[in-house]
Amino acid sequence: MSEELKSKVEAALDKVRPALANDGGGVELVDVTEEGEVQVRLQGHCYGCPFSQMTVRNLVEKVVKQEVPEVTQVVNVH
């Protein structure tokens, strides 16, 4: 993963972290693949929440793809 791409993704994740923190959660960047897949791990109350997939798709992926067009998808890994 290029350091430039990784830092762009981290900056995008910084934009969603306050919303996740409001619910007692967080997000950690695990990896960015050569294909543009961003792998994240939800933390705190977000980890294991029944709505975690919706959170990743509707919040995290939406913001990351807006900020970093090279990203193809965001997936939650455990």
Image (cartoon, rainbow, N blue to C red):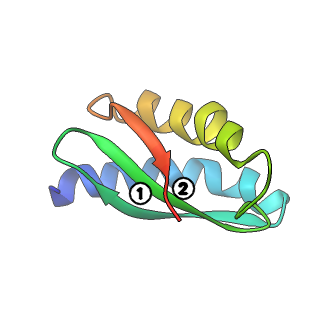
- Residue 73: image quadrant is top left
Badge 2 density bin: few <14, some 14–19, many ≥20, Cα 10 Å: some
Q: What whole-number distance in Å separates the C-alpha atoms at marks 1 and 2?
A: 6 Å
Seen in the picture, residue 31 relative to 75 is either above or below; the reply is below
- Tell me the number on the disc at residue 37: none
What residue is shown with label 1?
Answer: 10
Q: Amino acid at mark 2?
A: Asp
Q: Is residue 61 left or right of residue 39?
A: right
Q: Is residue 27 left or right of residue 44?
A: left
Badge 1 density bin: few <14, some 14–19, many ≥20, Cα 10 Å: some
**Rendering coords of residue 15 (x, y %):** 58, 48
Q: Amino acid at mark 1?
A: Glu
Q: Residue at x 41, y 53 (%)?
A: 39
Question: 28 and 9: which one is in front?
Answer: 28
**In the rendered image, which quarter contains the N terminus?**
bottom left
**Rendering coords of residue 54 (x, y %):** 69, 37
What residue is shown with label 2?
Answer: 14
Q: Residue at x 32, y 42 (%)?
A: 37
Question: 11 and 42: which one is in front?
Answer: 42
Question: 29 and 21: which one is in front?
Answer: 29
Callout 1 touching callout 2 (CB < 8 Å): yes
